[in-house]
Image (cartoon, rainbow, N blue to C red):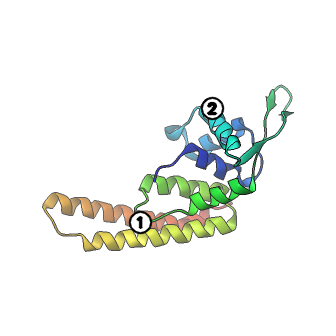
């Protein structure tokens, strides 16, 4: 699985309407400079999602004096279903980086039911990964070292997932 900006935008819209600028700003606040995306990419994503019927864009409104016109985006019912399904689609093969992105978004933007479902799926998938790695401890020294590293990463992810509820608003 790979994180796609479209899915991130849908999750960021879970709390209510936002402009592309506001979505870009929230993305930067959640993920910091290391994962920064260009505002133009967010705007392209919004356009693509609108064409797909996953969000709608309203007429321009002035949010602050001098800020120019911004187009507020709203999730459609289909967009809401897709964002919850994507956020919760975690399995033992989900990349750790992908799990991190989903977890950060779940903490910040998911509704309580979606957050709980993400957390349950993430913990189940991580426990399955730990079990699978424990069964594969044979092989040459490099294979064993790689497996030991992967086990420690999976244990750290499980610990992090268990701590996520403490970070919810």
Q: Nearer the viewer, residue 154 or 16?
A: 16
**Quarter holding the N terminus?**
bottom left
Label 1–label 2 contact, CB within 8 A: no
**Label 1 environment density (alpha carbons within 10 Å; few <14, some 14–19, many ≥20):** some
Q: Which residue is mark 1?
A: 92
**Residue 118 appears left or right of 51:** left
Does residue 94 sit above or below 8 in this rendering?
below
The percent position of residue 156, horizontal first and vertical second, equals 41, 63
Picture residue at 64% right of the left edge, 65% below the top: 114
Picture residue at 26% right of the left edge, 74% below the top: 135
Residue 52, picture quadrant:
top right
Q: Which residue is mark 2?
A: 39
**Label 2 environment density (alpha carbons within 10 Å; few <14, some 14–19, many ≥20):** some
Residue 25 appears anywhere in the view: no
**Residue 60 appears left or right of 34:** right
The percent position of residue 41, horizontal first and vertical second, equals 59, 33
**Residue 146 appears left or right of 105:** left
**Mark 2 or mark 1, which is nearer the start of the sequence?**
2
**Quarter holding the C terminus?**
bottom right
The percent position of residue 102, horizontal first and vertical second, equals 54, 56
Residue 48 appears anywhere in the view: yes
Picture residue at 75% right of the left edge, 52% below the top: 76
**Distance between the Cα atoms at labels 1 and 2?**
33 Å
Picture residue at 57% right of the left edge, 65% below the top: 118
Element under disc 1: loop
Does residue 162 sit above or below 96 in this rendering?
below
Count of numbered circles in the view: 2
The percent position of residue 77, horizontal first and vertical second, equals 74, 57
């Amino acid at each position: 699985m790979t994180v796609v900006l479209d899915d991130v935008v849908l999750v960021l819209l879970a709390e209510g309407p936002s402009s592309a600028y506001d979505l870009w700003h929230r993305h930067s606040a959640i993920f910091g400079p290391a994962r920064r995306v260009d505002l133009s990419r967010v705007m392209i994503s919004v356009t693509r999602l609108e064409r797909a019927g996953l969000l709608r864009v309203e007429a321009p409104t002035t949010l602050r004096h001098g800020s120019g016109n911004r187009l507020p985006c709203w999730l459609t019912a289909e967009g809401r279903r897709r964002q919850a399904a994507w956020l919760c689609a975690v399995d033992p093969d989900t990349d750790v980086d992908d799990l991190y992105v989903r977890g950060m978004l779940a903490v910040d933007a998911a509704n309580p039911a979606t957050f709980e479902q993400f957390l349950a799926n993430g913990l189940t998938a991580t426990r399955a990964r730990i079990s699978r790695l424990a069964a594969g401890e044979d092989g040459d020294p490099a294979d064993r070292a790689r497996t030991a590293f992967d086990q420690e990463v999976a244990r750290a992810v499980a610990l992090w997932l268990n701590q996520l509820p403490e970070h919810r608003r």
